[in-house]
Image (spheres, grey):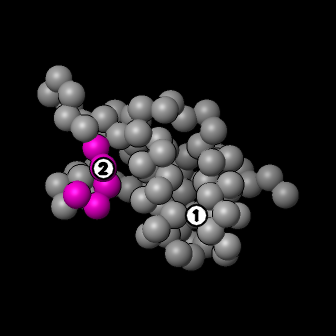
Amino acid sequence: MEHYTKAAQLENMIRDCPDLLTIREALSWSPFGKNQLYKLIKEKQLQAHYVQGSYMIAKSELIDYLLKHCDDDSHLHMFKSKSGGEEDD
């Protein structure tokens, strides 16, 4: 899938997502489990900021990570079914 097309598809899927996400919100808007999300943050693969005792993730950082690492449609399918979003044709 072309990068621009994938970016537009991801942004459409999470258009109602807040611009800044807590870990709990990121879990509900992404295909990741809690341990996997913390591992990505710890290994600095996913940019997050530690604010008042908890991590905050920018929606744009989540989209960037997914664009770089979800190269096949199976990841996008998993993401759509978890977030409840549907692809528009």
State the extent of the magenta-drawn residues as a range: 44-48
Q: What main secondary structure does the magenta stretch of the protein show?
A: loop
Give amino acid for label 1: Leu
* Residue toward you, 38 or 43: 43
Give amino acid for label 2: Gln
Q: Which residue is mark 2?
A: 47
Residue 55: image location, x then y, percent: 24, 36
Classify residue 15 by image quadrant: top right
* Residue toward you, 58 or 37: 58
Q: Residue furthest top?
A: 52
Residue 13 inside the magenta-drawn segment: no
Residue 47 placement, left or right of 28: left
Residue 35 in view of the camera: no
Q: Secondary structure at mark 2?
A: loop
- Label 2 neighbour load within 10 Å: few <14, some 14-19, many 20+: some
**Closer to the camera: disc 2 or disc 1?**
2
Which quarter of the rendered picture does the N terminus lie within? bottom right
The numbered disc on residue 76 is 1
Q: Residue furthest right?
A: 89
